[in-house]
Image (tube, helix red, strand yellow):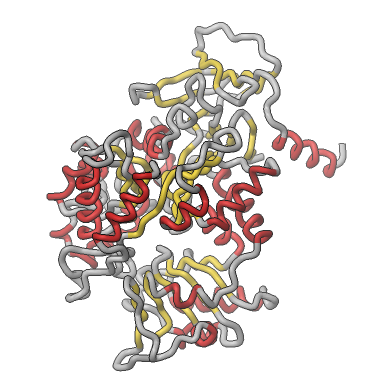
Amino acid sequence: MTRKFLAAMIALTLAAPAQADVLIDNVEGITIGEDGTIQRFTALVIDDDGKVAQILSAKDKKPQTDYREDGEGAVMIPGLVDAHAHVMGIGIGALTLDLSDTTSLEEALDKIRRFAAENEARPWILGRGWNQEKWGLGRFPTAAELDRAVSDRPVYLQRVDGHAGWANSLAMQAAGIDASTKSPAGGRVERLPGSQAPAGVFVDAAEALMMRAIPAPRPNERDLAFAEAQKVLHSFGITAVADMGTSIEDWQAFRRAGDTGALTLRIMAYAAGPDQMELIAGARPSPWLYDDKLRLNGVKIYLDGALGSRGAWLKRPYADDPGNTGLPLTGPAKLRNILVRAAQGNFQPAIHAIGTAANEDALNAIAELAESFPGDRRWRIEHAQIVDPVDLPKFGQHGIIASMQPVHQTSDRLMAEARLGADRLDGAYAWNTILGLGGRLAFGSDAPVESPDPFAGLAAAVTRMDAAGEPFGGWRAHDRVNREQALAGFTSEAAYAGFAEGRFGRLLPGERADFVLIDRDPMLASPGELRATKVLETWVGGRKVYDAD
């Protein structure tokens, strides 16, 4: 058998949908039961619709099926659901410059210089991932420094959190930005000391000044980026994702993949603002499309920026920047107008709120509207990172879902302490406290801001320690969650947060057969072992979409 023929057969196997009952046998199965507890099993039967037909324990008689797949003793868990990511950002990030691994300005400049040399045909050098905190710079980088790496083409690079961008001189020139350019509402153009000259960094809404000059990706480039995103996510065992900030261009890329049979990822989409929401879906959320693989659920609303760029909206000024309380991106009146507009059409709002003032306004707005719009709304607050302790009980009211990213706590811990001071962190990344107050958690990664690796997220959730085991015993350890809660946050609760319960998120009869085969038991592995979990296979709707071999 030739290598070419073997590759073709493998591709055909991955692409072909299940056509008959399949028994997946000889596994150490784990799922989340209806009561939220862990249930174990040894085999799974998939029907010809790609749904779970039976869950079998060792004592159960195995039925006759058309096909049998030997799990070879691997651990089977439900397909992992990322409750907050940026799908197209993951794909575009895989095709552009990634600075997330750089630890100094000079290292970043060297990497930018090499990337530009290797991509001479690109009219712009684009990328993301820089972090001045990780570089120990103590300030934002400048256009003049970026010019040292590339001066013959425009360069624009987004910060790791996506809330600031770094441009070189040619990029600012292409965008028509000079000393007379004013900072827009909800944004900030950084200036050179003692001058009005733009320094080269654009925070939050000011990024739009640069974005208007950057050529938009063509449809075929978006299709390529989306294909890359699916590969990346499936390699981490992710079978479904809440896409935060879907544009009409993104939606069309998802639809093209669905129309051609190339859509293997389940996407719960949240439009990039109310105008995109109506452009994509019209008056009501879309139906589930392509066998529960795509739905426009609601709308993403930005209340503030991020801690790293000091754009998170706080009640009191930053400890390391007196006088600065961050950038409110959506005012109270506008927020309530958008929420009413969404609720009238039964769209689900997903409100980005990181700082104390932003979280307070989001929680208060929900409380004000809940009486006028009763029912199962599942109001979502994305990130909910720094909450004033007096506001935490509000998460237990009105069915609010705290959509949080465990790895943010380990990545941002030192920065949060510097930005706020230790005395203002009692409501920071308060996962267990929110659960204890009656709130619900959905977990995600915020990729490409962080790695989409859900096993790093699981480890952070149960330990509140980073990959190096710091700090010993966990940071504010009383807010870690147990393993059952962590796994539910990345499976059944993340599905519930997107109105997908009963469709996927658990391995129970009637739900889609989305599962992952891994090399260790996440309920028993040490934190270090949990982080090192290897995904062997990923299946969506009874189809194998990733095989490590």
Residue 405 showing in the rendered view: no
Tell me: residue 16, above or below residue 167. above
Tell me: residue 223, above or below residue 517. below
In front of the other: 462 or 490: 490
Residue drawn at 47 percent across, 56 percent down: 276
Q: Quadrant location of residue 203?
A: bottom left
Residue 219, given in percent of the width and then of the height, sits at 65, 60
In front of the other: 331 or 465: 331
Residue 521, given in percent of the width and then of the height, sits at 45, 31
Residue drawn at 44 percent across, 49 percent down: 270
Residue 369 showing in the rendered view: yes
Tell me: residue 488, above or below residue 61. below
Q: Quadrant location of residue 442?
A: top left
Residue drawn at 53 percent across, 69 percent down: 127
Residue 89, given in percent of the width and then of the height, sits at 52, 58
Residue drawn at 51 percent across, 28 percent down: 75
